[in-house]
Amino acid sequence: MEKIETKYQKIKKDIENKINTGKFKSGEKIPSERKLCELYNISRMTARQAVNELVKEGIVYREKGRGTFVSSPNFLQRNVKSFTDTLRERGFNPSTNIIEFSTVYNLREISNIMEVPYETKFYKLKRLRLGNELPMALETVYIQKDRCLGLHKYDISKSLYEVLEENYGYKVENISCDIDACIANNIMMKVFNMKKARALLKITGISYTSNGEKLFYEESYYRPDLYKYRVDIFRRT
């Protein structure tokens, strides 16, 4: 027997379709319940039920005193995969702004983490990662200069994993990382186009090659409403 859609389900589906087709864009305010009543010739209760369902599924979100807005897309990373590949798999256009590319040295903390002499020179690569032109992550990578001389000659706006594997023969096999939460400061708010301070996901970690060598250290900040990490934990046998 075919399931009959209720009025609120039809309204919900129509609003969702308008979001998927771009009529209602990410971050844009959708019509108020009163306006929905006029547009669809429905009761206030039906309009509220349709919007409540969209809120439950995370498709839209409410802000007290302001209204209901279209949620930004979420991207979930659960394994060793580049930011570029993660977004492409979801049909989004990844892009990168290079903020800094320099040679640095006498970095005691980084040198200790990478277990190399204090005077070791590193390439410092800071990149703002975007999906469909929306800022999602700020990444800073430190990699030994003598392990990838001439890195600046390659297109470092794309996947760093690809650049290192194709041009230097390094394949990232696993990553050991720490995940913390922090509140965006004024600089981060500007970087991520935030109007008010919000929590950020801070991820620091070391990427290892297939033969177990430390390849680079990374410190990254992600907007958790846009990008998520999943960690699977298994019982040791």
Image (tube, rainbow, N blue to C red):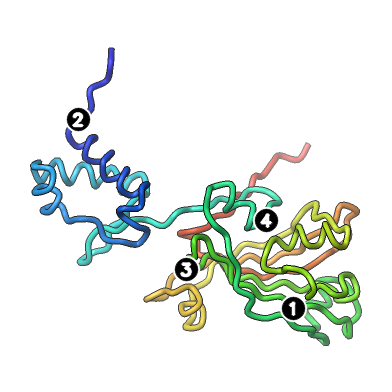
Disc number lying in front (3 or 2):
2
| Mark closest to the chain's N terminus, 2 or 4 | 2
Instruction: Determine the residue positioned at 86% across, 76% down.
Output: 145
Q: Residues within 10 Å of mark 4 (few under 14, many from 20)?
A: some
Q: From the image, state whether disc 1 or disc 3 is nearer to you.
A: 1
Residue type pointed to by label 3: Ala
CA gap between label 1 and label 3 equals 25 Å
Relative depth, front residue between 16 and 222? 16
**Sequence-wise, which precedes: disc 1 or disc 4?**
4
Q: CA distance from mark 2 to mark 4?
A: 42 Å
Picture residue at 22% right of the left edge, 61% below the top: 67
Q: CA distance from mark 2 to mark 1?
A: 57 Å
N-terminal-most mark, 2 or 1: 2
Numbered disc 3: secondary structure: strand
Residue of label 1: 124
Residue for point 19% across, 30% down: 6
Q: Is residue 34 left or right of residue 145?
A: left
Whether pointer 3 and pointer 2 mark residues with C-beta atoms closer than 8 Å, the reply is: no
Residue placed under numbered mark 2 in the picture: 6
Q: Earlier in the sequence, mark 4 or mark 3?
A: 4
